[in-house]
Image (cartoon, helix red, strand yellow):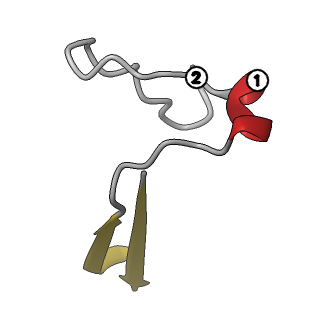
Amino acid sequence: MAVGILEFRDGKVVRERIYLGELWEPPAWRVQWLERMDPEAPPAPLCRANRC
């Protein structure tokens, strides 16, 4: 659904690009692997310093 690209310089983010795709229905052969996302659900916690 989205791709984020971060550019770093000297350990700091200097540029961020986010590309969003159009929503689409998967082909029938892929439906078995489909996982719908609830847009109202709270975001999952982020991992920091390899501690989840």
Farthest residue, direction top: 41
In the picture, the disc for residue 18 is none
**Which residue is rendered at x = 36% and y = 49% of the image?**
23
Quadrant in the picture for residue 11: bottom left
Farthest residue, direction left: 40
Badge 1 marks a residue whose secondary structure is helix
Disc 2 crowd rating (10 Å Cα; few below 14, some 14-19, many 20+) is few
Quadrant in the picture for residue 41: top left
Q: Closer to us: mark 2 or mark 1?
A: 1
Q: Residue 26, how many percent across, how many down?
A: 59, 43
**Which residue is rendered at x = 48% and y = 22% of the image?**
36
Q: Is residue 31 left or right of residue 22?
A: right
Q: Residue 34, how many percent across, how many down?
A: 63, 27
**Residue, disc 2:** 35
**Residue, disc 1:** 32
Q: Nearer the viewer, residue 9 or 33?
A: 33
Q: Nearer the viewer, residue 23 or 44?
A: 23
Farthest residue, direction bottom: 9
Disc 1 crowd rating (10 Å Cα; few below 14, some 14-19, many 20+) is few
Question: Does the image show residue 30?
Answer: yes
Q: Quadrant of the C terminus?
A: top right
Q: Amino acid at mark 1?
A: Gln
Q: Is residue 41 left or right of residue 48?
A: left
**Total count of labels:** 2
Q: Residue 48, how many percent across, how many down?
A: 48, 34
Q: Nearer the viewer, residue 41 or 12?
A: 41
Q: Amino acid at mark 2?
A: Glu
Badge 2 marks a residue whose secondary structure is loop
Quadrant in the picture for residue 20: bottom left
Contact between marks 2 and 1 (CB within 8 A): the answer is: no
Measure the alpha-carbon separation of dots 2 and 1.
9 Å
